[in-house]
Image (cartoon, rainbow, N blue to C red):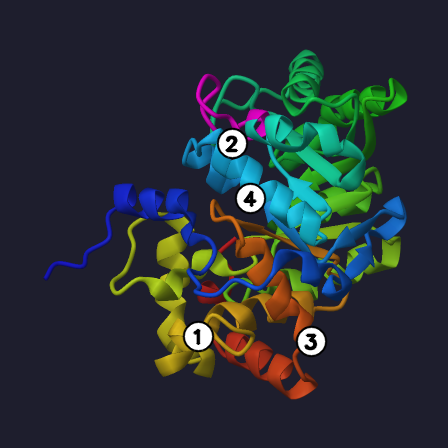
Amino acid sequence: MNTHITRRETLKLLAAGAAGLAVPGVPVFGAMRERVEYRRLGRTNLDVSVVGFGSLSIGLASTEQQRVTQLLNRALDGGLNMIDTAECYGHPDKNHSETLIGNAIGSRRDEYVLCSKVGHENGHFGQGADWSSASIHRTIDRSLKRLKTDHLDIVHLHGCTVEVLRAGEVTEALKQARQAGKISFLGYSGSGERVRYAIETDDFDVVQLTLNVFEQNAIDDLLPLTQERDIGVIAKRPIGNAVWRFAERPEWGWYAEYWDLIAPLNFPFFKGDALADPGAQGAGGMALRFVTSTPGLHTAIVGTTSPGRWTQNNGNVAAGLLSAEQYQAIRTSWRALPRKKRELA
């Protein structure tokens, strides 16, 4: 049987909710609230659920509104209060993630912290960048309308270069939106040196960066800086898109890069029965707990289209932090990789 995974099939898997793990027997939703951990998101002083919701999957899949409504309301009932979206997560005229979220839980706006992004007004999935002040203002106004709210808690610059940041127009546009009461805090979403520069400007209250068992650079290079400045930290791709579930190497972007690291990292939770274990000791549970056990990390946003998945992920995190021995073993295996393999970003 041919198990080769094409880019199209990879997208379908993500769209179907493969960013989370398929599990039988989801726990009762209402019983989970008392087991939800909240952390202070740096100097914003916002308390956020350690397991947040990332909305790329629902936009990528053009997920049906009824399913998103069920998913998000169940998660809010269970204690979720951190929701991340973006201006370009989805096709403008077909179930854009911002529209789906607004329709699903706009009436419960006071129950969650809401983040969106700017920089791709007329593009989708990170294409069509426009860093002009006018575009940023239009994008924020459109996001407010789509999300059915009069304010956004955090707006991130969505991956602009250091040169764009240095020019200052984008940051000034966000400050103007804050002055107008449309947003509360400035954020930057990106990786590597771009995040470092954003941190060092001290203009940003929150950064969103990649952190998972495959990409650990931020632990050494960025988190000491955010802790020093009391900047909130959101982890994106915290379970590395669960690439261990593929029988053969995917072809698309960081899916392939992560998959290539499974063998050399040699984590015990990426072997045998742990691969199919949906619990805290399984592949997904251990990968997510590694991220949430990292000092200086406040919330990890996991994408899914499956109602109940947030509850499962939260249940795994509620099992507790990794032991110092477990955490350091993961760090040691990653540090043993050749430098090139450790610098995916």
List the residue tagged with mark 4. 71
Q: Are marks 4 and 1 in contact (CB under 8 Å)?
A: no
Q: Which is nearer the N-term, disc 4 or disc 1?
A: 4
Residue 235: numbered disc: none
Q: Are marks 3 and 4 in contact (CB under 8 Å)?
A: no
List the residue tagged with mark 2. 89
Q: Are marks 3 and 2 in contact (CB under 8 Å)?
A: no
Residue at position x 63%, y 49% in the image: 75
Residue 320: numbered disc: 3
Q: Which of these two is toward me, 54 or 221?
A: 54
Q: Which is nearer the N-term, disc 3 or disc 4?
A: 4
Span colored in magenta: 87-99
Q: Secondary structure at mark 1?
A: loop
Gap between marks 3 and 4 measured at Cα: 24 Å
Residue 277: numbered disc: 1
Q: Which of these two is toward me, 297 or 114?
A: 114
Residue at position x 42%, y 78% in the image: 274
Counting from the top left corner in percent of width and height, residue 338 is at 45, 72
Q: Which of these two is toward me, 112 or 333?
A: 112
Q: Amino acid at mark 4?
A: Leu
Q: Which is nearer the N-term, disc 1 or disc 2?
A: 2
Q: Are marks 2 and 4 in contact (CB under 8 Å)?
A: no
